[in-house]
Image (cartoon, helix red, strand yellow):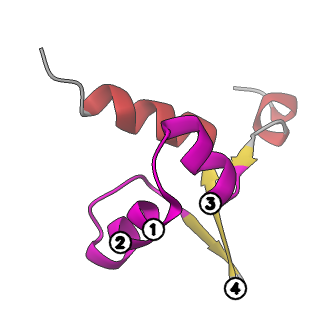
Amino acid sequence: MDARTQLTAKFLTQHELAELLRLPERTLEDWRLTRSGTPYLNLGRHVRNDVQDVLAWVQEHRRG
């Protein structure tokens, strides 16, 4: 991965992630509290999710 690829990472807000996964935002909050959900970053007081990390997490949790 070159430097340009690393700089184009897409970070989602909680609202954007909830829309992507079609889940309530409260579910994402619960997952963070129990450390059982998608990977996330704390940037100061802001929570962000790297879309590539989220997609990898989804693939790891596929069934069937």
What is the three-letter code of the residue carrying label 1? Arg
Q: CA distance from mark 1 to mark 3?
A: 9 Å
Q: Quadrant of residue 32?
A: bottom left
Find disc 3 in the rendering and name its residue.
14
Tell me which numbered mark, 2 or 3, is placed earlier along the sequence. Answer: 3
Residue holding disc 1 = 26
Q: Quadrant of residue 8?
A: top right
Disc 2 from disc 3: Cα separation:
12 Å
Residue annotated with mark 2: 30
Real-space CA distance between mark 4 and mark 3, rounded to the nearest whole angstrom: 13 Å
Q: For the residue labelled by badge 1, is the local secondary structure a helix, a strand or a loop?
A: helix
Residue found at x 24% / y 33%: 61
Question: Measuring 61% from the left and 42% from the top, which residue is drawn there?
Answer: 19
Residue 51 occupies quadrant: top right
SS at badge 2:
helix
**In magenta stretch: residue 31:** yes
Badge 1 vs badge 2, beta-carbon distance below 8 Å: yes
Task: Measure the C-alpha gap from mark 1 to mark 4.
Answer: 17 Å
Q: Is residue 38 magenta?
A: yes
Q: Are marks 2 and 4 in contact (CB under 8 Å)?
A: no
The residue type indicated by label 3 comes to: Gln
Which quarter of the rendering shows the N terminus?
top right
Closest to the camera, between mark 2 and mark 4, is 2
The magenta segment is: 12-40
